[in-house]
Every structure is written in structure tokens, then in C-alpha cells.
Image: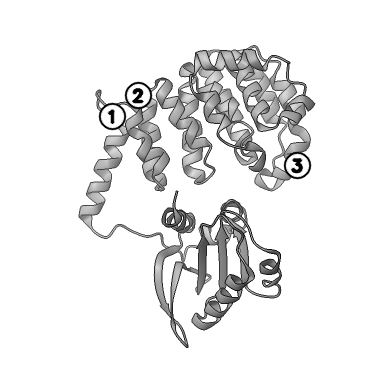
């Protein structure tokens, strides 16, 4: 990823909520014109709101001077808020410079979580209208692409879908790619779907990917879902439900019964109880381990081990991680490597 892609992905996060997000926008102010990385506009309760997003794809922490500069621009153009998004962090002086201001400092990971949890009014407002295609020709072209993705021709391989599922930032395109990979099936399809789950952006695409893996249970979908179960607590129960449904279709009644018991006792308050989940997750994982489903058992071992070795010891994972790695590699070559590429301890 480079700075330009970092900027575009940041803009796309807001677009998925229905905001208008323009990159490299030149905005006139009272004293001068300013080049804005991402210019966000949306209407809520009939009031137009304008935000400035500055994207800093730096390897070093952002200094105080950049915050002071953004404060000046926000004031000059009459924006309601200014946000600096970085892949690293901020110097101490920079954080202090935001006190009592309408400037917010965030890492990209923090921004993604805030947009999911703290901006429901934007996504639900009936005054916000998503960006529309410019012409009927564009609509037709898009429908052709979506249809071709959903219905792959016999000569198309799963790897062909990488650009649409992993590299695209269009959730509708990603969902169509998942539908196509379901029909192709096999190890490569599972690999791509698992890689998509390691990117927490795009709730709709994540949900569709989870369903896609559950439909490929006989190819290793349960193994992939259980290995990624603890990546993000927001999708924890969603994945368990998908595994339960897959076991139902496979006729694995014992595992289905165990997962049903866990799901029936979950906290009904939903996303707002995510912070409580860590207090009960060890008990639930212990109960799930009673299943005789090999994919679920070994997948949990892999996911827990690479998420946090100490946490894995705490919930008494059997001391046979080597067996689980060997099983996983024989069942699904490449999954262990994929899980190892992400530091899962930083995601929840």
C-alpha cells in the first residue's frame, strides 16, 4: 500500500456509510484555497456537515505542527471537524494540541472501529444519499461485471478473483466475488476467503465471506472459520452461527447441538457488549472443544495459538499444536501461513 491507496481506502470507509467523500479536493477558504486529502460532506437532520480528513501514511509519529496547521485550515474553510488519520501514531505535543478543539487524532484501525460503532446516525439518516453511477452505460457495465463474477465460466480459476475480493474496495464487487468462489470451491477459494477475513474493513463483505466459507464446509470452510474465530469479536458469534449451519447441512448433529447451546446463552445486547466477551470466551471455547469435529477442533487450536500464546495456555489448549498444524496443512495448505501473517493480538 502507498499513500495514495491509504487515502482512497480512508475515503471509502466514509462512502460505505453514505457520505460523499472526495479525495485531493481543493477547497476555498476565507483567506486562501487549501488542498484537502479527503473532503467529507453529509446531511443529517437537514444540516449539511463538512469534515476534513488528513491522511498521513508515515513511518514516524505525526508532530504538533501538523495539528496546528489543520486547525487553521478547518477554521478557514468553516469545516465542522478535522481528523488526522495515520498508520503509526502521534507525538505527545500533537495530542496535547487537540485539547478543547474540534480536531481528532486517530490511527486507521481506530477510525475503522469508530465508523462502525459511533456513527450510526449517519448511516441511518434518510437525508444521506449514496453516490450513484454517472450514466446508464456505467450501470450496464457494472451489472455485467457483477453477473460474470457471480457466474464464473469453467476455465476461470479461483486466483482470478483475488483482484476483486482482496484488492477492490467495492463491497458489492466483493460480495459478487464470494458468490463466484462458492461455485468454484476448492483450496484456492478457501484461501482467498480466509485472507478477506483478515481485513476487518467492510461489514457487509465480511458477513458475506463468512456465509461463503460456511457453504464450503466440505472443502475446509469450518477449519478456516474456526481458525479466524478470534480475529474480531464483532464477528465471533456470526462465525459460530455459520459453523453451526454448516454442521447442520453436513449432518453433524453433536457439534450443531453444542454450538446451539453456546449461541442460545449469548448476551442479547449485541455489539455494545463486545467488551464483555473476553470474560466469557474462555468458558465458551472450552465448551466448543467438546465437539468431535476435527476441522473445528484443530482450527480453534491454530487460531488460539497464533492469536496469543499466553491466552492459549490460559484456556488449556491441548499441548499438541504441532498435530493441529500438520492436520491443517494437509487439509488446507497455506492456512497456517496466512494466519501467521497477522498480529491478531492487536485487533481486539
**Gap between marks 1 and 3 measured at Cα:** 43 Å
Tell me the quarter of the picture where residue 102 sits: bottom right
At numbered mark 1, what does the secondary structure look like: helix, strand or loop? Answer: loop
First along the sequence among labels 1 and 3 = 1
> In this orientation, which residue lies closer to the viewer: 86 or 101?
86
Mark 3 is surrounded, within 10 Å at the Cα level, by few (under 14), some (14 to 19) or many (20 or more) other residues, namely few
Q: Position of residue 337 (x, y in %)?
A: 53, 26
Q: CA distance from mark 1 to mark 2?
A: 8 Å
Q: CA distance from mark 3 to mark 2?
A: 39 Å
Q: Tell me: residue 323, above or below residue 90.
A: above
> Which residue is the extreme one toward the left?
137
Q: On residue 276, which mark appears?
A: 3
Q: Position of residue 28 (x, y in %)?
A: 42, 81
Q: Can you say whether 247 is above or below 15 in the image?
A: above
- Asked whether residue 57 appears in the rendered view, the answer is yes
Between residue 210 and residue 5, name the one nearer to us: 5
Quadrant of the drawing holding the C terminus: top right
How many labels, in total? 3
Image vertical order of residue 226 relative to residue 3, above or below: above
Closest to the observer: 58 or 217?
A: 58
Mark 2 lies on a secondary structure that is helix
Bin the neighbour count of mark 1 within 10 Å (Cα to Cα): few under 14, some 14-19, many 20 and up: some
Q: Position of residue 50 (x, y in %)?
A: 50, 72
> Answer yes or no: do the residues labelled 1 and 2 have beta carbons within 8 Å?
yes
User: Disc 1 marks which residue?
Assistant: 152
**Dot 2 corresponds to which residue?**
184
Nearest to N terminus: mark 3 or mark 2: 2
Among the two numbered marks 1 and 2 on one chain, the one whose residue lies closer to the N terminus: 1
Q: Residue furthest front?
A: 60
Could you say where residue 305 lies in the image, as x and y percent from the top left? 67, 26
Q: Is residue 271 left or right of residue 153?
A: right
Instruction: Confirm or deny contact between disc 1 and disc 3 (CB under 8 A).
Output: no
Amino acid at each position: 500500500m502507498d499513500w495514495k491507496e491509504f487515502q482512497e481506502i480512508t475515503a471509502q470507509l466514509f462512502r460505505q456509510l453514505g457520505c460523499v467523500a472526495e479525495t485531493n479536493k481543493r477547497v476555498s477558504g476565507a483567506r486562501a484555497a487549501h488542498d484537502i486529502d479527503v473532503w467529507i460532506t453529509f446531511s443529517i437532520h437537514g444540516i449539511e456537515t463538512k469534515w476534513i480528513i488528513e491522511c498521513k501514511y508515515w513511518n514516524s509519529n505525526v508532530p504538533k505542527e501538523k495539528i496546528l496547521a489543520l486547525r487553521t485550515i478547518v477554521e478557514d474553510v468553516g469545516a465542522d471537524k478535522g481528523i488526522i488519520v495515520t498508520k503509526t501514531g502521534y507525538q505527545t505535543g500533537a495530542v496535547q494540541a487537540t485539547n478543547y478543539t474540534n480536531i481528532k487524532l486517530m490511527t486507521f484501525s481506530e477510525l475503522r472501529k469508530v465508523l462502525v460503532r459511533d456513527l450510526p446516525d449517519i448511516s441511518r439518516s434518510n437525508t444521506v444519499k449514496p453516490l450513484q453511477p454517472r450514466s446508464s452505460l456505467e450501470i450496464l457495465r457494472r451489472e455485467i461485471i457483477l453477473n460474470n463474477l457471480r457466474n464464473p465460466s469453467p476455465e476461470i480459476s479461483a486466483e482470478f478473483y483475488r483482484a476483486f475480493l482482496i484488492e477492490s474496495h467495492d463491497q458489492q464487487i466483493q460480495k459478487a466475488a464470494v458468490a463466484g468462489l462458492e461455485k468454484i470451491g476448492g483450496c484456492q477459494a478457501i484461501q482467498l476467503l480466509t485472507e478477506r477475513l483478515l481485513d476487518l474493513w467492510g461489514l457487509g463483505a465480511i458477513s458475506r465471506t463468512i456465509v461463503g466459507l460456511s457453504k464450503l464446509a466440505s472443502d475446509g470452510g469450518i477449519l478456516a472459520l474456526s481458525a479466524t474465530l478470534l480475529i474480531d469479536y464483532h464477528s465471533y458469534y456470526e462465525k459460530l452461527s455459520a459453523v453451526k449451519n454448516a454442521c447442520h447441512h453436513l449432518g453433524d448433529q453433536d457439534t450443531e447441538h453444542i454450538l446451539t447451546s453456546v449461541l442460545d446463552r449469548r448476551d442479547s445486547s449485541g455489539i455494545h457488549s463486545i467488551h464483555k466477551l473476553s470474560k466469557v470466551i474462555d468458558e465458551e471455547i472450552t465448551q466448543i472443544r467438546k465437539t468431535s469435529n476435527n476441522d473445528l477442533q484443530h482450527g480453534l487450536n491454530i487460531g488460539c495459538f497464533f492469536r496469543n500464546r499466553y491466552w492459549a495456555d490460559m484456556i488449556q489448549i491441548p499441548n499438541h499444536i504441532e498435530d493441529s498444524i500438520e492436520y491443517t496443512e494437509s487439509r488446507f495448505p497455506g492456512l497456517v501461513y496466512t494466519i501467521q501473517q497477522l498480529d491478531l493480538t492487536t485487533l481486539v
